[in-house]
Image (cartoon, grey):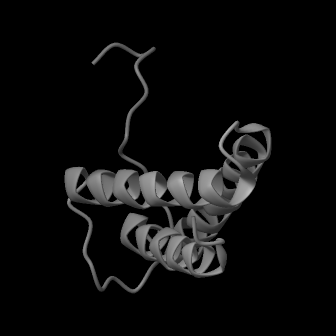
Amino acid sequence: MPPFVASRVRKLSSASKSAEVIARFGLRMAAIVAFAVVGGIGFERGLTLMLWMSAILATVVAMFDREELGDTTLNHWDEASAYAALCCLAGAFAPAS
C-alpha cells in the first residue's frame, strides 16, 4: 500500500477506543443539531430525521467493520443504539401533525 493512503489498522487500548467513540458521537451530535436548526422542515422533524439516518449509518458501518455487538469497548453498535434512542425520544416529543 502506498504510504499516502490511510491505514485502518490501529493499536488502541480499550479506554482510548471508547474515548474516540465518545468524541465522535459528540462531534456528530453537534453537527446534527446544527443542521436541524438551519433545516427548512422544522427543528423537531429535522432532528428526528437526522438521528434516524445517523442510526442507520452507524449500523451499516458497524456491519461493514464486523464489530462485535456486545463488545467491552464502545463501538459503532453503541453509537447506533444511542442515535436510535435519541430518535425515539425526539419523536415522542414532536408535535403531532
Vertically, is 74 above or below 11? below
The percent position of residue 78, horizontal first and vertical second, equals 44, 75
Point out the image quarter for the N terminus. top left
In the picture provided, is 50 more to the left or to the right than 53? Answer: right
Asked whether 80 or 3 is in front, the reply is: 80
- Tell me which residue sits at (22%, 50%) in the image: 64
Asked whether 96 or 34 is in front, the reply is: 96
Q: Is residue 24 visible?
A: no
Point out the image quarter for the C terminus. bottom right
Vertically, is 59 above or below 93? above
- Tell me which residue sits at (71%, 41%) in the image: 35
Q: Quadrant of residue 89?
A: bottom right
Q: Quadrant of residue 38?
A: top right
Asked whether 92 or 53 is in front, the reply is: 92
- Tell me which residue sits at (37%, 41%) in the image: 8
The percent position of residue 62, horizontal first and vertical second, equals 30, 59
Q: Is residue 47 visible?
A: yes
- Tell me which residue sits at (52%, 54%) in the image: 49
In the picture provided, is 35 more to the left or to the right than 11? Answer: right
